[in-house]
Image (tube, rainbow, N blue to C red):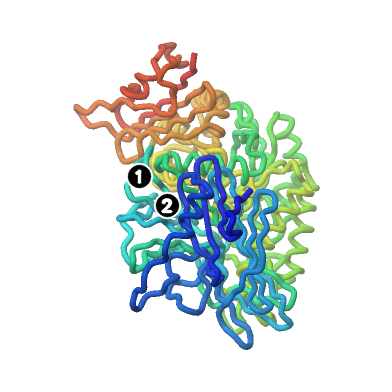
Amino acid sequence: MADVAEDGHTWLLSGPTSSYALHLTPADELLHLHWGPRIGLADAQALAESPPPGHRPFESPLDGREEYPVEGGPRFTRPALSVRTDERRGTEWAFESYDSAGDELRLRFRDDGVEITLHYRMRGDVVERWVTVANGTHARVELLRADAATWTLPDREGWRLSQLHGRWAAESRLTTAPLTYGEKVIGSRRGHTGHQHLPWVALDTDATEESGEVYGCALGWSGTWRIAVAQLPDARVQITGGAGHDDSGLLLLRPGEAYTTPVFAGLWSDGGFGGASRAWHAYQRAYVIPDADRDRPVLFNCWEATKFDISEEQQTALAHRAAEIGVELFVVDDGWFGARTSDRAGLGDWTPNPDRFPHGLRPLADRVHGLGMRFGIWVEPEMVNPDSDLYRAHPDWVQYRPGRRRTEQRNQLVLNLARDDVREYLWERLDALLSSAPIDYVKWDFNRCFTDAGWPGEPYPQRLWVDHVRALYALLDRLRAAHPKVAFESCSGGGGRIDLGVLSRTDQVWTSDNTDPLDRLAIQHGFSQIHPARIMAAWVTDSPNTQLNGRVSTLRFRFVSAMAGVLGVGGDLTRWSARELAEAGRWVALYKEIRPVVQRGALYRLRPPRGGLSAVQYVLGDETVVLAWLQAQRHGEPAPAVRLRGLDPTASYECRETGAVHRGAVLLHHGLRTGLTGDLDAAIIRLHRI
Ligand code: GLA
């Protein structure tokens, strides 16, 4: 619950180690006071009473100090809120009231009939913020921009910005650079979260992996978005972000309508980048990811093995092999439906292909269940191939602009999910599909960006960008409610739709189409900055790698790489030798033993993947697991010892691999030799506290 100072206008929210404070002045200016270590109400009040900065010619007294800068008046920063009515533009708000019911603090403002509510909620040390704008007037209100939050950092010198950039098959690359004056803007103009940036930033001045202050912000939205990090003329830093890629129109609010922004979550940590990541992971496991206490099964996915050339018989053969090595969930990827024999046809027709599955999916699903595995399928509901029954029947159901080309990517168009009839069709089809066979799992894909986001006949087609995401969320929510035992994976050509919004309604994500085990280490390193291993699906595929780069690697290296997340297998098991299958079986069995520690433990990045030896460690209760990879060894340079973290220096730890007993203090200070040699070697070390 939020604490309120005696003045009635200073609010303080606190988590286990951090606090957040804000203050309303008599002139209804909402000022940011504090975000950082825990403070008391008296401290917040002292901050509220500290004198404002003196007069600065050509500068605003408000810039860099406000909780949520609106458009208009003496402000020169990028506005978080931009509103237009037939008569006016911008906002001049008056404070109305606040309440702090439960764990949420709400501050209400009004500008004529436009009601603006700022929401705050502490989740552990994560501050969740979002905003509601309601049209209480009798006229239309155009919302040009409504960010979810603006975050203000304390005065410091030398801020650095870390971000996760990428592209298809090379997602979540961590990069850090000094912040300079002006703005750094990241986002997506593509209709989905995008491979190009995860909606996360972290700012620090001198943090290391395990110490120092880190401020992180992550947005929960799966459509277009923007986060702007600004270093203002007085060097103060503010971060503003929300849905939508520009300020040209988010929604038209008719009288009585309201818009609620996505959540923009902020985390302060003084445990360095590692501590910040562990806090983000704990937050997502506790508050975001459904059923996060339940470990995810080992899956097999047929995509790399069979591509579009699939049949019931061949899938059955693969299922036998998968069951033999201990797989728990068998997933039929693309190619099971409609006329989908290549990527040129079939999207939109969500009924089993009668040549390939003459009796539907049930016989295969039953066989898979008979082998002791769960059964899953791939879908891409938001898309349609022009060569499909759905498109032939409803060519107007796609996003398009009259008089303009309908841009195809991967031979497909985007359905306009903002339309009621499209939403209803998808609900009926998917509900019927999930009822037609015992399906336990759905890989939900999204394989192209928006290019022609038009909606002929709709007076305010801009709403399509927001309404598409809302429709996706509503569809997922409705399907989950109707089929509570079905798990969902978010996929978008690999990691093109990973964010806190989709994660609150999916069980895991497909991290990347890049299944090369070495490339994956860099992707996983970036991914782990914000998201936990519990959702990070990773497959062991064939060597040489068929999907991308032809790299040759051992089963050992491939398995240990994929065991850092939710293990899957995606190779052509019908071509694996008896020896390979037996070895795979041993790795899968080992994964099942370490799985609770990997999926639910605290993650320590011991050494980043920069060419030589890299390692991660997971700690859960008395169990510790270390995964280590050696990319290449130079002659005369033995792989260094790996110093462990998160252990009790006074305790002893028994290595399950060797039986050796190690002192905690020694593991922490001197480290452990992994025994890795040569190129692309890998090891798993399990330690048990005794
Ligand atoms: C996307 C996914 C792949 C696979 C194909 C199927 O690219 O990321 O894993 O499902 O689609 O077409």
Indicate whether 368 appears above or below 683: below
State which quadrant residue 91 falls in: bottom right
Q: Which kind of residue does numbered mark 2 sit on?
A: Ala
Residue occupying image coordinates x 51% and y 48%? 19
Q: Sort mark 2 into few (<14), some (14-19) or many (20+) by Cα contacts within 10 Å.
A: many
- Nearest to N terminus: mark 1 or mark 2: 2
Q: Secondary structure at mark 2?
A: strand
Relative depth, front residue between 378 and 69: 69
Name the residue tied to disc 2.
202
Residue occupying image coordinates x 52% and y 46%? 40
Name the residue tied to disc 1.
207
Relative depth, front residue between 285 and 635: 285
Q: Sort mark 1 into few (<14), some (14-19) or many (20+) by Cα contacts within 10 Å.
A: some
Q: Which kind of residue does numbered mark 1 sit on?
A: Ala
Q: Is the C-beta separation of discs 1 and 2 under 8 Å?
A: no
Res. 351 mark: none
Residue occupying image coordinates x 63% and y 83%? 85
Residue 415 visible in the shown view: no
Relative depth, front residue between 413 and 676: 676
Residue 5 horizontal/vertical position (percent): 58, 54
| Number of dots carrying numbers | 2
Q: Is residue 627 left or right of residue 464?
A: left
Q: Secondary structure at mark 1?
A: loop
Indicate whether 111 appears above or below 471: below
Residue 6 horizontal/vertical position (percent): 59, 55
Residue occupying image coordinates x 54% and y 78%? 248
